[in-house]
Amino acid sequence: MSGRSRAAVLLAAVVTFGAALVPSAHAAHAPSVHAAPKAPRTAVLDGGRLQQTRARLGHDPRLQRALRDLTTRADTWLDQGPWTVVDKPRPAPGGDVHEYLSQAPYWWPTTTPTADNPWGCPYVQRDGQRNPEVDSGTDRQDAEKVFDSTYDLALAWYYTGRRAYAEKAGQILRTWFLDPATRMNPDLDHAQFIPCKYDGRAIGIIDFSQSYTSVLDAQAILAAGAPGWSAGDRTAMGKWNADFLDWLKNSDFGKQEGAAANNHGTFYDMQLAALAYATGDTALARRTVLDARAKRIDPQIAADGGQPQELARTRSWHYSTFDLVAYTRLAAIGRHVGVNLWSYQGPDGQSLFKAVDYLLPAATGAAAWSHPELEFHRYAATDVVHAAADAGDAAAEGAVAKLETPPGGDLWALRPAAEQLDSIAG
């Protein structure tokens, strides 16, 4: 999803960057020699490491290849969006168009819709089988585009200095979160509703918790000096984040999600810690990471590294890697507040290293995954293995060369924070 370079190294690397980075066809992506951005105060990413990586780009072919993959992704966003919660076909229950709305993905109608029963109620659950209607008429897909695009664009700006990337990221963020006519209210009261059953559910918080830390980091990167992201934008976005954090801590839905015992609880903690850190409450961020040792790792990871609750799912590989995305990002937040979550061992020896090592035979292709999985993608584990390797896991370090490259390239060197690499919609 680290160290800091000296100023002389940074200046020298930036001055030579334009000539050494990439072939002339990519010259437009070279960074400005006059405005090298400072290290951003990111919540998950290590800002000092980003700054150091930027300084190395001019003489590291591996980084140059990764940058081409990143800018290719960023370029695709330049002609898309911005998106807003107010343009869905029907508002959320209650009628406020500014309320975020999504639909439970694994719930299906049992009858053919009619004029008297337009949804085909009642709905029943089919675990792991995604109902395609959830991708039409709600905000879920647009929110994911906001998360992905702003992250790609902000990182691309940071590494290239190209103004268009920063300005597009700022436009997307302002439209979704800040502009009065189009902004989203800072709550998830109507996430993952089930037609004719629930107007919203606590587990809908994962719509944001699985990816919103990317938006927090994108904001921090833009705040490092990006054109088109003003002091007013930073203040307004900080207020939105503070209001969202307050809702997450104090709403009934937030409290229910925080009590969840599977990946929902892990992602809740990760989002809570990241928001706390981003809004200046480092004490809450630190406490959340510390509490995750006994609250999450002890009951959720077995002595052999398996995650029993995730292994019981019909998509056990997906959910095992998915939960570790939250854990590895939480560990990254811990680094900022003085907590080494990687070094923790539970009473039965359970640890994040063991949880990642449990995946290595399947992640490297050395053995088949022996648990239920409707759609196996070996690359889903690539980022979490990178994270463990960076944290000092010798087995993970040895596995890196055998990992499968995710679609769109392996961007770990440029954005060392684990992503959910296999789409839940796939």
Image (spheres, rainbow, N blue to C red):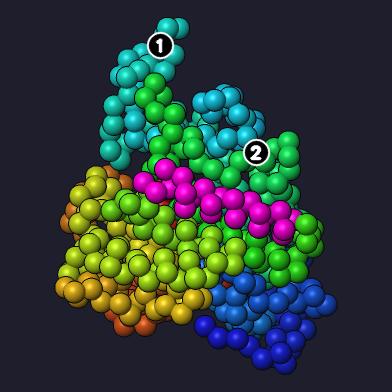
Question: Residue 217, how many percent across, how many down?
Answer: 59, 63
Quarter of the image for the C terminus: give it.
top left
Find the magenta span and give its range: 233-256
Q: Is residue 424 above or below residue 295?
A: above
In the rendered structure, the answer to whether residue 142 lies left or right of residue 403 reads right
**Residue placed under numbered mark 1 in the picture:** 117
Q: In this view, does 321 lie above or below 386?
A: above
Query: In the rendered structure, does residue 235 fall within the stretch colored magenta?
Result: yes
Residue shown at 52% from the left, 48% from the top: 247
| Position in image of residue 287 (x %, y %) | 42, 69
Question: In screen coordinates, is 251 left or right of 110?
Answer: right
| x and y, in percent, of residue 121 in the image | 35, 18
Work out how far the residue at label 2 is from the one at label 1, CA to CA, in angstroms.
29 Å
For disc 1, the neighbor class at 10 Å (few under 14, some 14 to 19, many from 20) is few
Is residue 123 covered in magenta? Answer: no
- Disc 2 residue type (three-letter): Thr
Q: Are marks 2 and 1 in contact (CB under 8 Å)?
A: no
- Amino acid type, mark 1: Asn
Residue 316 visible in image: yes
If you read the primary sequence from the N terminus, does the residue marked by circle 2 or circle 1 appear first? 2
Residue drawn at x 46%, y 80% as measured from the top left: 338
Residue 335 shown left or right of residue 217 in the figure: left
| Residue wearing tag 2 | 84
Q: Is residue 325 left or right of residue 227?
A: left
Question: Which residue is painted at 62% across and 61% down in the image?
Answer: 218
Instruction: Note whether residue 406 is visible.
Output: no
Give the tally of numbered discs. Answer: 2
Dot 1 lies on which element?
Answer: loop
